[in-house]
Structures are given as C-alpha cells and as structure tokens.
Image (cartoon, grey):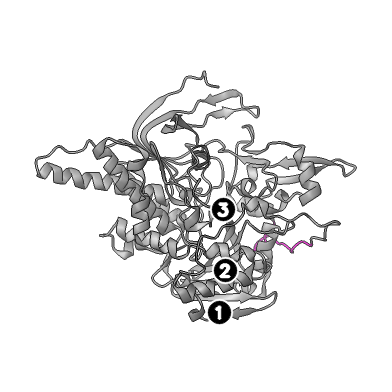
Amino acid sequence: MGDIERETMELDVLFIGAGPANLSAACRLMSTIREYNEKATADGKKPLEEPTMLVIDKGAKTGNHNLSGAVVDPVALKQLFPELPESEWPFLTRVTQDQTYYLTPTGKIPVPAFLLPPEMHHDACHLASIGDVTRFLAAKCEEMGVEVYTEFAATELLREGRKVLGARIGDKGLDKDGNPGGNFSPGMDLLAKVTVLGEGTRGYLATQLIQDLRLDVEANDQSWGLGLKELIEIPAGRIKKGQVIHTFGYPLDMKTYGGSFLYGLDDNLAAIGIVFGLDYADPMLNSHETFLKLKRHPFIASILEGGKVVEYGAKTLPEGGWFAIPQLAADGAVLVGDSAGMLNCMRLKGIHLAMQSGMFAADRIFQAMLQNDFSAPTLDYRAEFEASWAGKELHRARNFRQGYHGGLIFGMIGTGMHIMSGGALPGGRKTMPPDHQGLKKAPAPLPPQPKVPTDDTLYLDILTDVYKSGSIHNEHQPPHCKILDPEACKRCRADYAMPCTRFCPTKVYEEKLDADGKFLGIQVNFSNCVHCKTCEIKDPLRNVRWVPPEGGDGPKYQRM
C-alpha cells in the first residue's frame, strides 16, 4: 500500500509510548530547554528555539495500556520534580507493612526480614496505580506545551539505512484482508530528528530496531516474566492500607521462578497478582488457572473472601536485567524504559528505572540539539546510566534472575551468596536460553487437567476476567495476533499439546475441532488480547507474531 498519499508532520522529537519513561523524558527535556533559554537570555546569548515535541500512544486514553503492581520507589520522581511536595505525588499511600511468606499448598511460612536482601524491603516506597502515574505525568507534559496524542498506533519505523527518520501511524478502516474499507483513513508519517522508543514491554518497533541493527549483539537474550493482576473490592479490615504481602512457592512448582503480591491500596481495595518466569518447563502450565489456585489458597482466600473483582489485566516483564540491556541508541533513535529492559527483577520494580532512563535520554537529546548532531554516540546515555544510582542498582542484581533458571533451591542459594557478598556473587556473567526453548515435550497420554472452581464475583473464569480488562478490538480489521504457519500447529499439538491455549492469559488461542473431534487448527480470538505478547515470547515453534492493532483498541485499564 505504498502508493497511498499520506499526510506528514515534522517534529523535533517524537516519543512513541505514553508511559513513565517517555513522559518523564518529555518533561525533563522541555524543562531543561526552558532553563537553558532563561539563562541564555539573561547572559545575552541566543536561546534555543523551543522544539516541537509529540508523545503518542496506541491506547484509547492515557493509562489504558499501562499495568504494574505497583510498589514505587519515589527516587526518580523526586529528581524530576524536586520542588513537588509529597502530598502532591501521584501515589495512593506509603507502604506501612512489609511481609514475605513461603506458601505450601495449605499454609504459609513467614520469611524473617533479615533473610531478605535489602532490595526486597520496601521502606520509603509507595503503592500506586500506574495509570494514575502516567496521567499525572501526561498532565505535566501538557502544562509545558508537549502534546500527548492517544489512539496513535505506530506500526513502522521510517528509516534511511541505519538512521531512524520517524514513524508511520497505522492505517484505520482496513478490512480483514488488509484492504481499505469504506471508512479507511491512512496513517500519518511523523518525521523527527529523534524518535524515542518507550513502547513498554517488548515494544513492537523497539524489537524490530534491536533485531535489524543488532543492538543486542553484546547482550544476553532477554528473559521475560508474565504477570496477571486483579483489583478486588474486599470487606473493610481484611488488609491494611499500605500493607504489602509477597509470597513464593505454591501454586508454582519448585522449578518455576515466580511469586505473588497482595497490596492494600485502600481499606477495602486490594491488588493481587502472580508473576512467573516464561522460561518455565511444564507444557501444561495454565496461567489463568494458576492465578485462580493462588486466590483459592487458604491464606489468600481469608483476605479476599466476600470480595468482588473490579478489574483484570496481564503484561510481560523484561527480567533479564543488567546483562540483557541492548545498545540504547541508534542514529536518530533512543530506547528507554521497559523497551530497553529497565527492570530490577530482584526488587520487582521498574517504574523508577524507567523514569530515570527517560531523564538520561532527555539530557542526551538536549546536548544533541545544542550540537545539531543526532547520531548514536551523541544520543547514547549508557555511560550516565551506568554511573548513576540506577545503574549501580541494576548491576548489583546482575545475576539474580539467572540463578533461578535451575529452580528454586539453586536460586535461593544464589540469593544467599548475593546477600553475603553484597552482589559480587554469583560472579561472572550468567546466561539463560531464550524462553521459547524452555518447554519440555508434553507427556503421553496427557494428564488430567482439573479446573479450579469459579463463580460470578471473586473467582472469575478467564472470559469474565477479559471483560473486566475492558479489552475490545474492531473485529473487521486484520487480526493482530497471527499464526504464521497453520500447518505447524499440528506439530505443536503433537509435541507440546498446544501450550498457547494455556499460557495466554486471555484465551486468544483456542483449539478448533470438527463434529468428530478431528483437529482443525487454532482459532485466534484476537479481540480478547490485552497486548502482553506472551504468545510471541513463549511459543516453542516461534509461529506467532503480534503486531499493533488499530489505535484505540486493546485494554481499557482504569486503576491498574
């Protein structure tokens, strides 16, 4: 469709993704330029021309596609807005209690605080809705004159060789075959001196750029976790506002890395979630059933019973850490936040690192503007990141996640070595195979897969949870979740028993049989998708591709 006439907009800086990293970058860049211009004017020097900056996001509204636990370290927020009083921070409450338990199938064992690394304590941290944080930052951007546009899904980087020139917005009104329909609207070309890729976890354009330019040639393969989360209204008094509970053990087996969280957001509102590594081996693991098992655990159920689910969501997390961070810049482009792998798996925190990465990127972009040089060396902020508290924090946890690839026992031994050595052990550079290689072959015959009982209020089935995510897509458009070779599904079914029907947290993939029980293939219910991209990461045959749907489609997270 290259012959379509498209509108063009010329910008100085284009930010793709309205998450904490990009919004922090836009705020920092604009405030830095204004401070510079004020000083330049006072000194009788020529000020910089105020740049044209635009933040775009594929969600219908700001925050609709943002999901996190979230326990937030406020260190980056304080750097970004040093004059902002704590009473105006976009958080729900300070952390008031901090508890960790090992769960057995029927009970719990408390973990003494002194056995946990300092990084696993949450002193001075806050509970937050990531949606609230992004809306706060977007408002700050707009106060500074930075436009934030939603329903803009960037589907293609505009490049000249290795140089990024901007991005193309996806067309709207295509039919299922990809042809223009009656309400067709071509996407605009946004040209920019710098394109900042802060698309979140496994960003579509960021992934392409990393692969095409081999920006990860010196990095470990990224490893991923999958998180499922609900907000639940519960009877008052079951959990204290500001209470933080983390668990490990049940319902995961000893070989699967992960754990759960239960946060008291208010006296009658709890956030519960489970996160597990996508390097898991069990082909029969069912993400949503595992979440239900957690909620049915006697300890967890004692807090949630009588409650009502009000919102559901899922996302993947880049857990590879220090050694999996790719090169952070290309000519005309910068990577920030989750798209750059900025998450501390040991702390289960990334918002503060995302914001800090955005601020470092902004400082580099400012220098590029002064020099009129937007090449990769000028834009690369790795040196500043590595020298900062953020870099030192990630470096200290550099081999934490890798230690758990061999199972819980080996991981705990590694964590003990980490505590005693101040992060120096395990030493060296540990690696993990790509997550899609982790699955074992399915047993034959398949073991029974008993379902966890569900109801209409608290223990929701998967499709009711999808409804609680608010996710919806125009079903007349081309499917954005694509099976590349339908014939390969037969081999996947024989070898792995169709794991996509279990690892997807929203039942996008469903076995299709005829009246005689003959396998016809995999039905793709793409309207259920919440854009977590687990399918691309975990499919053992690498037979699934995720592409951005029309702008505005997808989940409609409100308080996540």
Majority secondary structure of magenta residues: loop
Q: Earlier in the sequence, mark 3 or mark 1?
A: 1
Residue 261 lies, with reference to residue 327, above or below; the image says below
Q: Assign the N terminus to one quadrant of the image.
A: top right
**Which residue is painted at 30% across and 58% down in the image?**
79
Residue 188 colored in magenta in the image: no
Percent across and percent down for residue 137 are 37, 51
Amino acid type of the residue tagged 3 in the rendering: Lys
Residue 412 lies, with reference to residue 308, above or below; the image says below
Furthest-right residue in this view: 516
Using the rendered image of the protein, determine whether residue 460 is visible from the camera's viewpoint: yes
Which dot, 3 or 1, sits closer to the camera? Answer: 1
Q: Which residues are magenta?
A: 450-461
Closer to us: 386 or 357: 386
Percent across and percent down for residue 260 are 58, 67
Closer to us: 427 or 419: 427
Determine whether, in the image, residue 528 is placed left or right of residue 191.
right
Element type at marker 1? loop
To which residue does mark 2 refer? 234
Percent across and percent down for residue 224 are 57, 55
Say the numbered circle drawn on residue 351. Answer: none
To which residue does mark 1 refer? 111
Amino acid type of the residue tagged 1 in the rendering: Val
Element type at marker 2? loop
**Which residue is painted at 64% across and 45% down in the image?**
528
To which residue does mark 3 refer? 315
Q: Report the Cα–Cα distance between label 2 and label 3.
A: 24 Å
